[in-house]
Image (cartoon, rainbow, N blue to C red):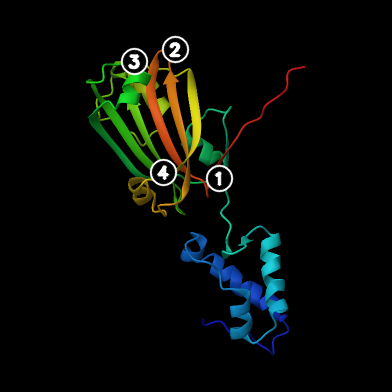
Amino acid sequence: MDFRLDQNSPIPLHVQIEGYLRTLINDKEYKSGKKLLPKEMTLSKKLGVSRNTVRQAVNTLVNEGLIERKKGVGTKVVHKKINTRLDNWISFTKEMQNQGIEVVNYMSRISLVKAPEEVAIALSINPKKKLFKLEKIRGSKEAKYLYSESYFHPRVGIHGNENFNLPLYELLENEHDIIVSNSKETLSAVTATPNISSLLDIDKVMPLLKRERLVCDPGDRPIEYNVVYYRTDYFTYNIEIRREP
């Protein structure tokens, strides 16, 4: 630890420590949550001050919502979670832009595959039928937020040369005259598989939010079967329910 307190400075000791902690929480390792902040007792001993002085600095950052204490774990940087609504269907890119987040496409891969059983049933196609599968990893410059798989009904006319970095449903409408009208969704909590853990650069035991979506056209015909795995340390879903009078 290179930081040293300036005992002769007019700046109070707890404010100096607070400034040091602010520097730490912007460090990549701490910001990602992979590394815990130094313990209060450790800082107290190394800086030669009372634990109350360190705690005063820590409390300031806790009250600002920048860090959090977890009993038996330690103190870590708080991720600003992205809140999205279930009753507000817009593209992920536009949704992030509305929250001032620049979207980064870490991966976009299209392939022709045999339809998995649950996909064939959802899309009402022959299980032996091949169809296009689109895989994406998206997030911000800070981290990867989600991994998604989209399977398209052969009726859509996907040929594999589309620019899938564009908002998907705009692409389908502009290039294939497909208009999406509604979706049927299921949400569940799951544990990351080794494959998804590797793709999202997360621990194997991290809980994920899994969203399964069947997207249909105005005639209620299936267009896309979509599965998305969201990192729960970055993403939450909100829904507003009103009671009928």
Q: Is residue 187 above or below residue 50?
A: above
**Residue 215 drawn at (x, y percent):** 43, 22
When asked about the image quadrant of residue 180, the answer is: top left
Badge 3 vs badge 2, beta-carbon distance below 8 Å: no
Specify few, some or many for label 2: CA neighbours under 10 Å numbering under 14, 14-19, or 20 or more.
few
Q: Tell me the quadrant of the picture where the C terminus can be found.
A: top right
Q: Is residue 163 visible?
A: no
**Residue 42 drawn at (x, y percent):** 59, 79
State the residue at coordinates (43%, 36%).
228
Where does label 2 land, which residue? 220
Q: Nearer the viewer, mark 2 or mark 4?
A: 2
Element type at marker 2?
loop
State the residue at coordinates (61%, 84%).
45
Q: Earlier in the sequence, mark 2 or mark 4?
A: 4
Q: Earlier in the sequence, mark 4 or mark 3?
A: 3
Where does label 4 land, which residue? 138
Q: Is residue 231 visible?
A: yes
Q: What's the distance in space between the residues labelled 2 and 4, CA to CA? A: 28 Å
Element type at marker 4?
strand
In the image, what residue type sits under mark 1?
A: Gly
Of the pair 62 and 138, the residue shown nearer to us: 62
In the image, what residue type sits under mark 3?
A: Ser
State the residue at coordinates (68%, 89%).
7
Q: What's the distance in space between the residues labelled 1 and 2, CA to CA? A: 34 Å
Q: Which mark is residue 100?
A: 1
Of the pair 12 and 163, the residue shown nearer to us: 12
Q: What's the distance in space between the residues labelled 4 and 3, CA to CA? A: 29 Å
